[in-house]
Image (cartoon, rainbow, N blue to C red):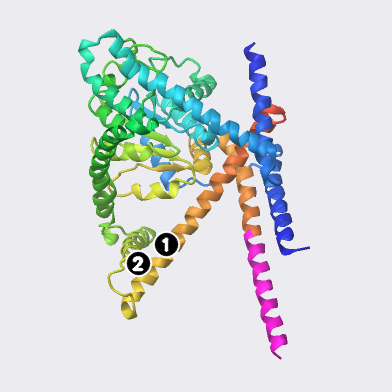
Amino acid sequence: MPEIMNTVGIWLGAFFTFAIFSFLYKDNPFYKLAEQIFVGLSAGYGLIYIIYAALIPNLFHKLATDFSGNLILLIPFVLGLMMITRMVPKFQWMSRYPLSIVIGTSAAISLLRFLKSDLIAQVAATMINPFETKVPSEIVGKLMIIIGTICGVYFFYFSKKQEGIAKIPSKIGVYFLMVSFGATFGYTVMARISLLIGRLEFLLKDWLHIIK
Amino acid sequence: MSQNTSSVIERRIVYFLLFLAVLLPLLFPIGWGSDVSPVVKMSYDLIDQTPAGGIGLISFDYEASTITEIQPMAVAQIEHAWSKGQKVIATALWPQGPQMAAQSFEEAKRNPLFKDKEYGVDYVNLGYKVGGMVTVQALGSSFKDVYPKDSSGRDWDTLPMLKDLKNLKGLSWICSLSAGEPGLKDWIMIAHDVHKVPVTGGTTAVSAPGFLPYVNKNGQLTGLLGGLKAASEYEALIGKKGPATTKMDAQSVAHILILVLIAAGNIKVWIRKRDKVNNTEVTNA
């Protein structure tokens, strides 16, 4: 039985791969079918997974086995129920309270962490002495980091019109940004080709058994 | 033929050529190699220099859609850690992570060198937890509180390799294989920046440029594997001709084709512009 299910799964995978690829020729009912099934399945899978992986072990199981020892869990339980009131227009206002708690705590946690890791640590990482090494390529690399960071940030300084000599660092900043966009585009192409390789490998290996 | 129809046909030709450029090298491998980049070597060195018996953590923060790029990294890193006598813990901030971890361990155990690796002694799969950054933060205090059981329901105390592990500080290294949020960034911000545990990572090629600035003098990230190419470089470093290496031929041929198409597209635009200018001059004359 598991072998038959595996074979059916592979054939369904092959069918849906072709259905999605058919969009490259033009929009058609097979593509639409595959798209709708994917969206529905993902939503259903996500919902069931959260119930079994988060709600049951972290909330219902604990309350069912030791209610008095886990009284504090009633707070998130009630907040969760209040969130569901969004579906009833008359009681929709109640959902704002749990939502505000989620937004508030997320913002507070993220603010601290991002400030430390993305601002302070990143700024500190550009405070380097380019001449501490004797290797020419490393000196050039470090100088590029310093100049690129300063000029890149200066490009986004809009409080004063950038003209005359003040325009030069801004122009250099644009070149650094262009190089960065080019690198990002290259990486994106690589990622998209990898996805195609993955699908073709599935068709040739798992479905047709042409390659090992 | 209208310009619109011509552009649709051209687009289909490009798709067909790209399809062939990927298909043919998969059927008839060329065997092109690739150089190892410094950021991949840094990641390799982190695991390589960890003493035997050390515990590494791989967080499987991706799902099936990015398996082609990220799974080869996971398998290569597990094999590398095992070859050095280290133990590996798998966690996940994404729901499908535990399945990805189970597949990776299974794949690594197919290597005859590691067929005797034992669950609970050499590796564990702790499973998925919701919460992203909050979960990582909680691991900084106590692993056991966050994961009282592993992904298959076994109690923490029944898994021998976890006996002395209290929190993140007990780990020798952490690697987040990440396809987005939550993922690598959360591990950098908490595990490295707060608890000072060395963190390395593997991401899809799309995300790689955004993480490269973290490979800095502060050591926020100890090396980075970005996409299939980095996975193939890692395989080269551990002396393995794995799935990433065999797929790199297709990747390279497709990239050459794209470069040719970009050049051809630019030449076409240039010719069109020149003709337009010439036509305008003739009309004005």
Label 1 environment density (alpha carbons within 10 Å; few <14, some 14–19, many ≥20) = some
* Residue reaching furthest to the front: A90
Task: Tell me: A79 left or right of B76.
Answer: left
Task: Tell me: B259 left or right of B220.
Answer: right
Residue on which disc 2 sits = A155
Q: Is residue A112 above or below residue B125?
A: below
Numbered disc 2: what chain? A
Image marks 1 and 2: residues in contact by CB distance under 8 Å: yes
Name the kind of residue labelled 1 in the image.
Leu
Disc 1 element: helix
Q: Residue at x 65, y 58 (%)?
A: B261
Identify the mark at residue B141; answer none if there is no mark. Answer: none
Question: Which residues fall within the magenta stretch?
Answer: B262-285
Name the kind of residue labelled 2 in the image.
Phe
User: Between disc 1 and disc 2, whose residue precedes?
Assistant: 2
Residue on which disc 1 sits = A177
Numbered disc 1: what chain? A
Residue A190 position, x and y percent, is 55, 47
Residue A25 position, x and y percent, is 71, 46
Say whether residue B242 is visible.
Answer: no
Residue B220 position, x and y percent, is 30, 43
Q: Is residue A146 above or below residue B88?
A: below
Q: Which quarter of the figure has residue B8? A: bottom right
Q: Which quarter of the figure has residue B165? A: top left
Q: Which quadrant would the C terminus of chain B be assigned to in this image?
A: bottom right
Residue B5 position, x and y percent, is 74, 58
* Residue reaching furthest to the bottom: B285
Q: Residue at x 66, y 53 (%)?
A: B257
Q: Residue at x 65, y 25 (%)?
A: A10
Q: Residue at x 72, y 30 (%)?
A: A210
Task: Tell me: B159 left or right of B203.
Answer: left
Say whether residue A41 is visible.
Answer: yes
